[in-house]
Image (spheres, rainbow, N blue to C red):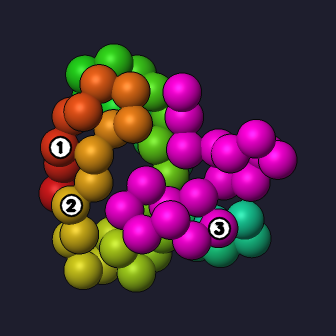
Amino acid sequence: MSTTDEQGTRSCVSCGISVAGTNAARFKCPDCGTVIYRCAKCRKQSNLYECPDCGFLGP
């Protein structure tokens, strides 16, 4: 599973907004390699995120 929904829309793993066309970060989970997307606002505020596959928690 990744942070892409069934319509192919990429969403922020922290807040759930669509990150299409934004300055979002895309990276792999340090534990399992699942692709994770985070919006610029959540990155700037250092909001926590949780990997949807393995439950890894990150800042």
Q: N-terminal of the two: label 3 or label 1?
A: 3
**Is residue 17 located in the magenta-colored stretch of the structure?**
yes
Question: Is 15 above or below relative to 32?
Answer: below
Q: Secondary structure at mark 2?
A: loop
**Total numbered badges shown on the rendered structure:** 3
Earlier residue among tags 2 and 1: 2
Residue at the image position 50 percent from the left and 65 percent from the top: 16
Going by the picture, which residue comes out furthest to the front?
6
Other residues around mark 3 within 10 Å, as few (<14) / some (14–19) / many (≥20)? some
How many angstroms separate mark 2 from mark 1 (CA)? 7 Å
Dividing the picture into quadrants, the one containing residue 9 is bottom right
x, y percent for residue 46: 21, 71
Q: Which residue is mark 3?
A: 18
| In-image side of 19 versus 3 (left or right) | right
- In which quadrant is the C terminus drawn? bottom left
| Drawn side of residue 48 relative to residue 38, left or right | left
Residue shown at the point (33%, 18%) measured from the top left? 32
Disc assigned to residue 9: none
Q: Which residue is mark 2?
A: 48
Proximity of marks 2 and 3: CB atoms separated by less than 8 Å: no
In this view of the protein, can residue 22 be seen by the observer? yes
Which residue lies most toward the right here? 7
Which amino acid is tagged 2?
A: Leu
User: What amino acid is labelled 1 in the image?
Assistant: Leu
Residue 57 marker: 1
Question: Residue at horizontal 45%, vertical 27%?
Answer: 34
The stretch in magenta equals 1-18
* Dot 3 amino acid type: Ser
**Percent x, y for residue 22?**
65, 73
